[in-house]
Image (cartoon, rainbow, N blue to C red):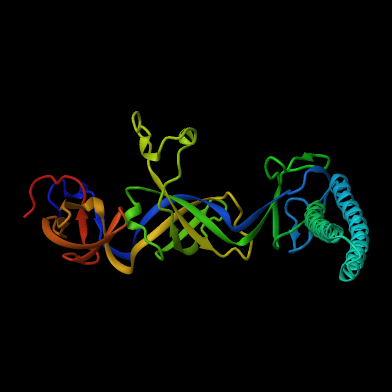
Amino acid sequence: MLPPGRDALTTVTVSRGNIENSVTALGTLQPRRYVDVGAQASGQIRKIHVEAGDQVREGQLLVEIDPSTQQAKLDASRYAIENLGAQLQEQKAQHALARQKYQRQQRLAAGNATREEDVQTASAELKATQARIDMFQAQIRQARASLRSDEAELGYTRIYAPMAGTVVAVDARVGQTLNAQQQTPLILRIAKLSPMTVWAEVSEADIGHVKPGMPAYFTTLSGGNRRWTSTVRQILPIPPKPLNETQGSGSPNSSSKSGSGRVVLYTVLLDVDNSDNALMAEMTTQVFFVASQVNDALTAPVAALQGSADRQIARVVAKNGRIEERHVQLGISDRLRVQVLDGLHEGDQLLIGPADGNGG
């Protein structure tokens, strides 16, 4: 029979279970590999062949831009080459005539039948016509290089998929005019939806416990009780800059932390297979980075222990109601329960809160 008041004691039972020491964080899912498809040619969009959600193969035609301007430039380059070619042929004929004159002057000079001045004039004209031939040939090479550039510009009016994947966003419309001279206009995004990457934000208080290669798992709001397992791929060394600091030329260390003081978060990346397409971009995840874990361990609630980190005491309530203090050796903790290595036994009843009187 318990002493008066002992039946009202609040106790918990030492039991066996699985326990893990982990760091928790929130994250966002993004495709591991994606590409933003832009336009390298200016003009009006004539046709978009895909929509968001479509599967595309590498090399598939995605967008057509009106090629009128690029085709006109290409035609002009071809006509310029034809014109230079005609001038080159004319100059070659002049060069052949200049050679004949020079050779005739050389024969006359051998018989002392001409002046030295006439020989020199013929020689200079021969060299001049050769120089003009070299000039036209160089101009033709330059025009052909310009032609290849214009051919490439015309090719840019037909945009093809740089990789296979899923069209996850279309940011342009048919009839929209694109200006590729100032910046590359983005038209759509293609992504591979497997594997996906979790971008987890870990506070600076916990980032020291997270290491590359550490096992981790995460859950999503839509996934119910399902867990996706992974390992830490990378820890980005610099936290993302706050939005209110993206303007100006101040260094990251020059920002003020006055007021409420912002929490510094570091980005940790984890990859996960998504072959069943259960995960979607921008999903919110709760991530658990597992530092250590033990299965079928003897555990006790943290609230039932007292003392410092290296000297913990548990108050065990015996069957006769007496309270006995025991020194306990502990292992890992999940903040709610802690692994008991020595000092307690399975089934022990531990007192929580103050006792009515002193135990023996």
User: Horizontal and vertical percent for residue 161?
Assistant: 74, 59
> Measuring 56% from the left and 56% from the top, which residue is drawn there?
223
**Of 315 and 109, the residue lying toward us:** 109
Tell which residue pokes out farthest to the front in this image: 112
Q: Is any part of residue 20 visible from this angle? A: yes
Tell which residue pokes out farthest to the left in this image: 360
Q: Is any part of residue 18 visible from this angle? A: no
User: Horizontal and vertical percent for residue 4?
Assistant: 13, 47
**Of 332 and 81, the residue lying toward us:** 81
Horizontal side of 164 relative to 128 (left or right) equals: left
User: Horizontal and vertical percent for residue 340?
Assistant: 23, 64
Q: Quadrant of the N terminus?
A: bottom left
**Of 317 and 311, the residue lying toward us:** 311
Q: Is residue 315 above or below residue 275?
A: above
> Measuring 11% from the left and 57% from the top, which residue is drawn there?
324
Horizontal side of 9 relative to 285 (left or right) equals: left
User: Horizontal and vertical percent for residue 193?
Assistant: 63, 59
> Measuring 47% from the left and 32% from the top, which residue is drawn there?
248
Q: Is residue 170 above or below residue 218?
A: above
Q: Quadrant of residue 360?
A: bottom left
